Image (cartoon, helix red, strand yellow):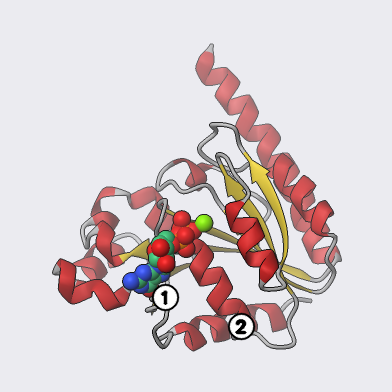
Amino acid sequence: MKVILMKKLLEANDRLAEENRAYFSGRHLLAVNLMGSPGSGKTTLISAVAKELPGIPVGVVEGDIASSIDAEKLEKQGIRSAQINTCGECHLDSHVIRDGAEQIDMRDGIIFIENVGNLICPAEFDLGEATRVLAASVPEGDDKPFKYTPMFSYADAVVLTKCDLKEAVGFDTENFSKGLRAVSKAPVFEVSLKDGAQPLGIAKFAEYLKEKYLALK
Ligand SMILES: Nc1nc2c(ncn2[C@@H]2O[C@H](COP(=O)(O)OP(=O)(O)O)[C@@H](O)[C@H]2O)c(=O)[nH]1
Ligand SMILES: [Mg+2]
């Protein structure tokens, strides 16, 4: 009984995801579903990459279990933001994405969906995005692609964040690549966005997004 209910929920989600896709494409918006563990650096990444995309409006639909901390942080930077509180749910679904997008009411630009911090559930829910990005951080360990294969295989691009901490935590980049390549051909962007330090690697990720945005019909 429970299995049937879950299937129905996923079917309803997928129908709404297609409607979201049409909504984004009708408004010339590149929707980016940004996933990753809690604290992997998702909000920091959005903030940094927005600065590297001059002339392209950026908005964000922020998903968190509680609080509006991230949306407020990004709004201060001039990024149009909507905050969704999932009240315990471990992922965002298509229904709430539409609510968030309508609240931002953007046309023409890049809209980030910062998913709830989790390496499991978000990979099951299509939100109608054009691109899926996984922020995997160095302190989480180089073995994560071996352990969380659905999430790593679901992503169109992987951003390896907090590379400034590689030496401190003994991160083995080769092992990380080996695990990732077993399940995915996604490009990897290595970034360091430590507070107060020179940001590194972010321009290449911005270029990747810009190309996708310019390729929108
Ligand atoms: N050292 C270092 N810290 C980072 C980096 N990126 C983010 N952080 C820090 O990691 C913490 C979590 O970042 P946040 O963007 O809030 O993660 P989120 O929960 O995935 O949105 C914050 O204290 C950030 O300042 C990085 O590249 N290097
Ligand atoms: Mg965040």
Residue of label 2: 51
Which mark identifies residue 146? none
Residue 4, quarter of picture = top right
- Rendered view: 176 above or below 11: below
Q: Residues within 10 Å of mark 1 (few under 14, many from 20)?
A: few
Q: Quadrant of the C terminus?
A: bottom right
Q: What is the secondary structure assignment of the residue under circle 2?
A: helix
- Alpha-carbon span between mark 1 and mark 2: 15 Å
Q: Position of residue 142 (x, y in %)?
A: 22, 63
Q: Residue at x 56, y 70 (%)?
A: 46
Ligand 1 within 8 Å of disc 1? The answer is: yes
Earlier residue among tags 1 and 2: 2
Q: Who is closer to the viewer here, 18 or 37?
A: 37
Q: Amino acid at mark 2?
A: Lys
Residue of label 1: 195
Along the horizontal axis of the image, is 217 left or right of 54?
right
Q: Residue at x 59, y 86 (%)?
A: 52
Ligand 1 within 8 Å of disc 2? The answer is: no
Along the horizontal axis of the image, is 44 left or right of 53?
left
Q: Residue at x 26, y 62 (%)?
A: 139
Q: Residue at x 60, y 48 (%)?
A: 63
Q: Position of residue 94 (x, y in %)?
A: 69, 44
Q: Quadrant of the N terminus?
A: top right
Q: Amino acid at mark 1?
A: Asp
Along the horizontal axis of the image, is 181 left or right of 54?
left
Q: What is the secondary structure assignment of the residue under circle 1?
A: loop
Q: Nearer the viewer, mark 1 or mark 2?
A: 1
Residue 187, quarter of picture = bottom left
